Each structure stands twice: as C-alpha cells, then as structure tokens.
Image (cartoon, rainbow, N blue to C red):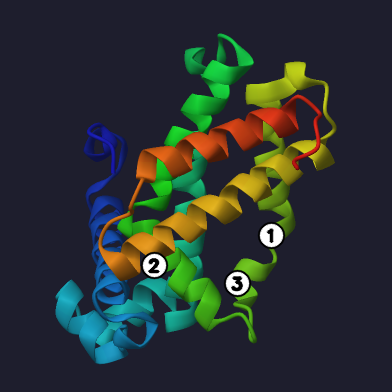
Amino acid sequence: MTSDTPAKLGKQALKTLVAREKILNAVISLINEGGFGAATSSKISRRSGLTWGAVQHHFGSKEDILAAILDHSHQRFTELMDSDTSTNGSLKKRVDLFVERMWQHYQSDLYVATLEILLASRKHPLQAADSKIKQQSSSHAGTMQAWFADSGLSDEALLEALIYTHTFLTGLMIEQVFEGEIANEEAHLARIKRSMLQMLRGKRLL
C-alpha cells in the first residue's frame, strides 16, 4: 500500500484493502514458515486476526487467495523491472542491473510463497490464475523489449534469455531456503549475468 493510498480511497475501501493485505500476508508468512500445508483455514484466520467467514467474504476461497498471491508476485516483479532511466547505458550495465533486480525479488518471502504454491498445484493448476498465464507472458516480453530492444532479438529469443536466467536464480533461491545461505553467491550471480549477456548478444551458450 503506497503512502498516498488513504487519500485516494474511501473509508470502507481502505478497510477492505487493509483486510485483504492482512490475509495475503498471513498466508505468505505461514507458507514461508511451514510450507504450503501450513496455510490451513484455521491458521490463516488466527494469523490474520479475521474469522474464516470474513476471509471468504474478501476472497471467496483459499484457491482465490493463492491465485491473488501469484498475481501479486507478478505485479511486484513488474514494478521492480519497470522501465526507467536505469534501462540506459551499456548492454552489460543493463544486464547486471536486471539480474540484480530479479534476484532482489526472488529472495523475498513473496516469491518463496509463490514457488511453493506453484509446486503444490502443479498437477491441478489454479483455475483463477490459469487465465493470466498468456497475459503475463506478454507482459514479460514487453519488459524485456523495454530493457533490451537494441539487442535486435525477437520476443521469443528475449523470453528464452529471461527463462534461462529465471531458472538459475530460482535454483539459487532454493539453495538459500534449504542451506540458509549461498556459498559463492556473487560468483554465481556473475556467471548468470555473463550468460544472459551472451544470449542477448545472440551467441550460443557452450
């Protein structure tokens, strides 16, 4: 919630927004502390300070809460990667900053919860989130074009570079979750940056 939100919203709308944020934050924290299975209806109610009936009033079902977290994660990523003056400079400089911003998001509790939700629902994808997959893919392509349009690569090639980087950063995040820290973190990030730079220059990775 931004600092000027109260001025833009009416009293009831603000109350609703605060309640929804309490619920989402409760689920995110429960998943981070105990895994996907820890986010039970009773624990969500207790952590958020709301009755389960109130939770359902704001979201409808637990699946809708999970879908809202996935959507929030995508929005947060988009905000972090939003094109601005940081997209100026050399290709290497932009790749370095791009990877650093991605890594910032991937280290967050929000992304950890997102990954837990995706893994837990991989055999039965959330219907509420499924319809947004194509929309998000288009959004990611737009983000890559905003940062790296001068590479001359197609949307498909740019998304390939993004997916490659996403895969390795997710692996680092998982190691951090299990080990508590990442050995040689800076060296790993440097390799990822070099690999992404090579792909954006149209070169094959060996």
Q: Which amino acid lies under the numbered mark 2 shown in the image of this protein?
A: Ala
**From mark 3 to mark 1, how far is it between C-alphas?**
10 Å
Name the residue rendered at 39%, 67% in the picture: 113
Residue 67, image x, y percentages: 51, 69
Residue annotated with mark 2: 113
Left/right of residue 74 with respect to residue 41 in the rendered view: right
Helix, strand or loop at disc 3? Answer: helix
Kind of residue sitting beneath label 3:
Ala
What residue is pinned by disc 3?
A: 128
Residue type at mark 1: give it: Ile
Please tell me which residue is depicted at 38% across the width and 81% down the height of the picture.
36
Residue closest to the eye, 156 or 138: 156
Q: Residue at x 72, y 38 (%)?
A: 141
Callout 1: helix, strand or loop? helix
Which label lies toward us, 3 or 2?
Answer: 2
Task: Compare residues 136 and 9 and report the one nearer the observer.
Answer: 136
